[in-house]
Image: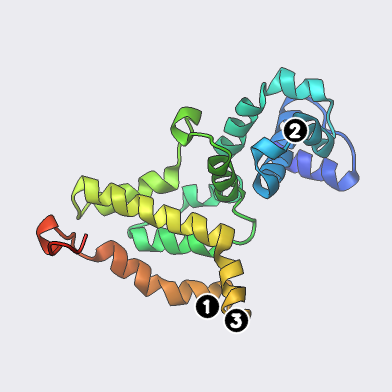
Amino acid sequence: MTVDEAVAAGEAEGRRPHGRDECVRAIVRAASVLFADRGPAAVSLREVAAAAKVNLGLIHRHVGSKHDLLVAVLRSRPGVGQLDVATYEDAAELVADLVGLREPRPLQLLVIVRALLDGYDLVELGVELPFLRRGADLLAERLDPEDAVARAALAAAMVLGWHTAGEAYLRVLGGTQVTVADLVDSVRPAIAAMLAAPAGTRSDVLPGKL
């Protein structure tokens, strides 16, 4: 049985996790949910300990501060880790898959947004974002490196926006019947067009139109 399976089994039985690895995994899983829902600034380590069914001292001993816990959560890649094993030959397919993530919830994406709103700096946290780097690398195969980076960052920001506000906007517009599959099918051509379009130049912008 893996550590993940042991933690899940323990949660199902309502028992406390045992051993360092199981405790750390339970702490990170509990923090992932709480940080995604309310943001790290609004969540205390005591609340994480209660949700993980561990003593507060175990968080300090095995993980460290809240900053350390946030880093551990982002490095665990909850909800997006499955993309690491997928093979993509096209950046648009990667973005479409990120848009369509629902089960499990893309907690890492939600935690990223919450952390940014709380004033955390992703670079200072030292967290790698493989899906972002992979998208930029795919685009760099046919675009200028700076253009590839800009488009990858824009696409990632769109994905973060969708997972935090997209469904609310759909409800405002009356799109309550739109399924995730419908959404992905609808936006896939637009994503592909945005990422495939040739780069513009400053000479394309008319004076006074900036």
Which mark's residue is nearer the viewer, 2 or 1?
2
Local SS, label 2: loop
Give the residue type at disc 3. Gly
CA neighbours of label 1 inside 10 A, class few (<14), some (14 to 19), many (20+) = few
Labelled pair 2, 3 in contact (Cβ < 8 Å): no
**Residue denoted by label 2:** 44
User: What crowding class fits label 3: few (fewer than 14 Cα within 10 Å), some (14-19), or many (20 or more)?
Assistant: few
Q: Quadrant of the C terminus?
A: bottom left
Q: Which labelled disc corresponds to residue 182?
A: 1
Quadrant location of the N terminus?
top right
Q: Is residue 173 left or right of residue 189?
A: right
In this rendered view, identify the residue nearer to me: 170 or 186.
Answer: 170
Q: Say whether disc 1 or disc 3 marks the residue closer to the N-terminus.
A: 3
Is residue 87 at all visible to an observer of this figure? no
The residue beneath circle 3 is 174
- Nearest to N terminus: mark 2 or mark 3: 2
Instruction: Tell which tag, 1 or 3, sits nearer the viewer.
Output: 3
Spatial CA distance of label 2 from label 1 is 38 Å
Q: Secondary structure under badge 3?
A: loop
The residue shown at (29%, 69%) is: 193
CB of mark 1 within 8 Å of CB of mark 3? no
Where residue 151 appears, as percent x and y from the top left, is: 31, 54
- Percent x, y for residue 75? 55, 36
Task: Identify the secondary structure beneath mark 1.
Answer: helix
Q: In the depicted view, which residue is nearer to us: 117 or 209?
A: 209
Residue drawn at (45%, 77%) of the image = 186
**Whether residue 146 is situated above or below residue 197 in the rendered picture:** above
Q: CA distance from mark 1 to mark 3?
A: 15 Å
